[in-house]
Image (spheres, rainbow, N blue to C red):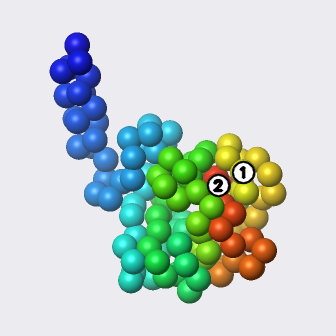
């Protein structure tokens, strides 16, 4: 039984897009891409979160319509300093997991360095 489950998990992992972060993140719905340090571009159809100001330090992109209830599932809780929304739809990031706490709008087409008092606070993300 263990071998069957391991094979099933391996097969499911093979279905993830290149750079997908975790099996849990894939299971909750978002198509996630990893953005390597040094790349500041957010692909069309994605909303992107960056570790540092000026879209530096690497981060993650989430396909349009995706949501993630806890950024810690991909090792990105409370580390966002800038974002770019090229998804074509309005997004919101939240200071707490499960879309709780203060929400912050991310308009389509905008690229933003968060305010100092908002730095490193994002814990969840979804269309709003």
Q: Which residue is mark 2?
A: 123
Q: Please give the name of the residue rendered at 55% of the width and 51% of the height, measured from the top-left corner.
A: 72
Q: Which mark is residue 86?
A: none
Q: Please give the name of the residue rendered at 46% of the width and 78% of the height, measured from the top-left corner.
A: 57
Q: Residues within 10 Å of mark 2 (few under 14, many from 20)?
A: many
Residue 41 visible to an observer of this rendering = no
Q: Position of residue 81 (x, y in %)?
A: 62, 75
Q: Secondary structure at mark 1?
A: strand
How many numbered tags mark residues here? 2
Q: Is residue 71 left or right of residue 58?
A: right
Which of 79/11 is in front?
79
Q: Please give the name of the residue rendered at 43% of the width and 52% of the height, measured from the top-left corner.
A: 31
Residue 50 visible to an observer of this rendering = yes
Q: Secondary structure at mark 2?
A: loop
Q: Position of residue 96 (x, y in %)?
A: 72, 51
Q: CA distance from mark 1 to mark 2?
A: 5 Å
In terms of sequence position, does the residue under pointer 1 or pointer 2 come before the other? Answer: 1
**Does the residue at mark 1 contact the one at mark 2 (Cβ under 8 Å)?**
yes
Q: Which residue is mark 1?
A: 96
Q: Please give the name of the residue rendered at 23% of the width and 27% of the height, measured from the top-left corner.
A: 6
Q: Is residue 104 left or right of residue 127?
A: right
Q: Residues within 10 Å of mark 1 (few under 14, many from 20)?
A: many
Residue 1's place in the image compared with 73, above or below, is above
Q: Position of residue 70 (x, y in %)?
A: 59, 47
Q: Quadrant of residue 122?
A: bottom right
Residue 12's place in the image compared with 54, above or below, is above
């Amino acid at each position: 039984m263990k071998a069957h489950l391991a094979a099933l998990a391996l097969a499911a992992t093979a279905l993830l897009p290149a750079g997908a972060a975790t099996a849990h993140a894939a299971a909750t719905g978002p198509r996630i891409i990893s953005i390597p340090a040094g790349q500041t571009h957010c692909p069309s159809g994605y909303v992107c979160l960056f570790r540092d100001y000026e879209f530096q330090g690497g981060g993650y992109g989430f396909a349009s319509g995706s949501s993630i209830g806890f950024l810690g599932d991909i090792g990105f809780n409370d580390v966002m300093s800038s974002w770019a929304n090229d998804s074509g739809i309005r997004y919101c990031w939240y200071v707490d997991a499960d879309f709780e706490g203060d929400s912050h709008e991310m308009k389509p087409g905008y690229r933003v360095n968060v305010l100092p008092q908002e730095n490193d606070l994002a814990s969840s993300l979804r269309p709003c």
